[in-house]
Amino acid sequence: MLLRTRITLLLSIALILVIVALVGLGTIRSGLEQERLADIAIDSQKSLWSSLVRDKADDLNTDASELAARISVAAADLAPSDVVRVLQDSPDLVPHNITVQVLGLDGEVIASNDPLFRSRPLLGTPAIDLLTTGVASLQGLRQERPDRYVVAAARAISVRGEPKAVLSLAIDAQTVIESLSELTGGPAYLVSLRGRVIAGTDSALWELARPMLPRRSAGAEFLSAGEKLYFAAGSPVDDLTGGIAGTLVTLRDATDSVTATRRLEQRGLILIVTVSLLMIAGLYVFLRQAFNPLEAAIATLGSLSQGDLSSHPEPGGAGEIRRIGEALVIFRRNALRLLEQEEGITRQRRRQERVIRRQLERLAETLDPEGRADVLADLKAIMSEPGREGQAQHRPNEELAILAEVLQRMSQRITDQHHRLTELIKELQGAIITRARLAALEQELDIARELQLSFLPRPLPPHPRFAISGVMETAKEVGGDFFDYFMIDENRLGIVVADVSGKGVPAALFMAISRTLIKATSLRAVSPAATITEVNDFLAVDNEQMMFVTVFHGVLDLTTGRLVYVNAGHNPPLVTGPHGPVQVLARTGDPALAIMEGLEYAEREIVMAPGDLLFMYTDGATEAFNIEGEAFGETRIETEVDGSRNETVDTVAETVRDAVLEFERGADRADDLTCVALRYFSGG
């Protein structure tokens, strides 16, 4: 971008910012002025409304005072018929458009000249209390029903100096709204707190404008209705007890004033923009004429920078621009002299390059073939670098630079080869050490696997009352699943199926501890619940690794078939007979072991019938996934158990295991897999 363009652009931006600032300040000032006018309009509206309501209420209060005196004299006992008679005899005080109501101190209507108000009081209990406890009178606006506002005046009726009733006179607020509309010269409305117009003078205009003014605070805004603009002012109005009764809204035609103001603002803005554009155009023309000599000098300088010395600059302009042109003429003359010197230096450099190249080629012959090829390639690349001829004009000792560059590359190649060889030796040493450690670790894992397999229970001798068998497949070399079965005494069989959190060596160690504790405790405990409770307290102590184990532990009485069991967060076993459906054994609702000390574990029991099959497993069966990411699930286990229920216990356990392995179809196993099957024959 040319300098004159940048200067013009910067000055234009500055001018635009100034214009924007002035317009913004004018807008802010206009807004503040509108707010001030709105405040004045709202205050004027409040004052005028208060004056009209007060005048109307004063008239009602005067009539109420006279009427209360007549009632207290002519109807001292406040009988409804007497009160009505007094009202009928006072046409001078009770015109047809005024509603009169006499209330008892309990709020009940005694009499009224309007049938609609013979059962609905105008005043509430708070107003009656005020009038009977010292307040001489109440007057003001009152919303006597959702669709009507009235201006009311009320005072107490005293008999022999003691308040006996309350008299209220009310007139529709529509009359006050009409008076206000005449004084302001525009429509006026009385709006309830829910936004509904109760009284107004121009309902059609309200439907067009519908000002969204606040209902509990004063506010003002301009509204568009058809082709006209209205200034809407709203302010809350109080009722005679001091609360907010609604909102008073007045509309004033502001079309002419607003239109004139906007027209003036538009003309002013157009004038400012026009003057600004003329100033920017004039500035651009002036800068273009002033900078033409400078642009010519810049063009000449560009040609010189590219080696073109044929141009002949002519100084022009005035001041600094002319001095730049004169300096450019001197620079061109010196550049011509320097070019002649550089041509002589270039010829000498070429001779030196040939000598250096021959010496380096001889040095490269002493290296190995790979190193020689690299050095010759570097030398060729350096000698053929683009711009080498032009660089000679600025590097008188070019031959030394070429030699240093080649030697630097040769030194770098030798250093890199040395580093690679050193790293290769270190990697080889590390690989040898890692291989030795891996071999030792594999040997240790094989020993651990054999040790874990030795923990599995050995087959019990054939027994006429039961048969039991189990299988286990670990996800790694060692796992966290285990199962056990053992004779507690000659009539009781103990069964354990468990799953330790995690996998690998830590889970295997925790498994060994848990298995040993459960078996040792169950041989002397009175029940499975006592066994699990005691083992949980032992495992939870100092459990810094936060490991846990889910356990199903049961004790089968071989004489009766009664199975008492505890399920500590484990998968519920399946039980089925020779012909019945496969059922899920009820849970005991207890958490896994080693989570928290002091837990009391509950137990349940069932009675197994001759021929019943109990199938126990770990979540490695239900949570086995195939290559599509689908889980084996409990439904497939129930199907496999149902299909092999009449087979031997060995076949049942192996059938479920084989089905799970077939389902995985080569997918990585996520968890250890354990299956245990128990069949009860009889207690005889």
Image (cartoon, rainbow, N blue to C red):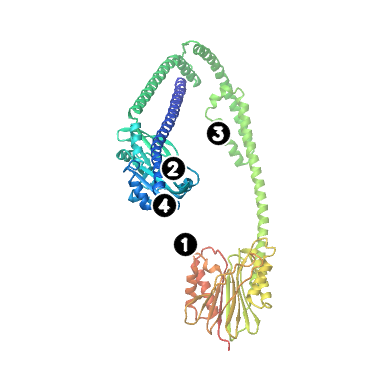
Disc 3 target residue: 381
CB under 8 Å between discs 1 and 4 = no
Question: Looking at the picture, how far across and down is residue 154, in whole percent?
Answer: 42, 44
- Asked which secondary structure carries label 1, the reply is loop
The three-letter amino acid code for the residue at tag 3 is: Ala
Residue on which the image places disc 4: 77
Of circles 1 and 2, which is in front?
A: 2
User: Sequence-wise, which precedes: disc 2 or disc 4?
Assistant: 4
- The answer to which of 47 and 473 lies nearer the viewer is 47
How many neighbours does mark 4 have within 10 angstroms: few (below 14), some (14-19), or many (20 or more)? Answer: few
Task: Give the mark toward the camera: 3 or 4.
Answer: 4
The image quadrant that residue 29 belongs to is top left
Left or right: residue 75 compared with residue 392 = left
Where residue 186 appears, as percent x and y from the top left, is 33, 33
Near mark 3 (Cα within 10 A), the count class, few <14, some 14-19 or many ≥20, is few
Q: Which residue is located at x 58 percent, y 33 percent?
A: 379
Q: Residues within 10 Å of mark 1 (few under 14, many from 20)?
A: few
Mark 2 in CB contact with mark 4 (< 8 angstroms): no
Residue picked out by circle 2: 240
Cα separation, mark 2 vs mark 3, equals 104 Å
Q: Quadrant of the C terminus?
A: bottom right
Residue at 62% of width from left, 83% of height from top? 461
**As displayed, is residue 227 above or below residue 526?**
above
Q: Is residue 451 visible?
A: no
Q: CA distance from mark 2 to mark 4?
A: 28 Å
Q: Which residue is mark 1?
A: 628
Q: Mark 1 or mark 2: name the one nearer the start of the chain.
A: 2
For the residue marked with disc 2, what is the amino acid? Leu
Q: CA distance from mark 3 to mark 4?
A: 130 Å
Q: Earlier in the sequence, mark 2 or mark 3?
A: 2
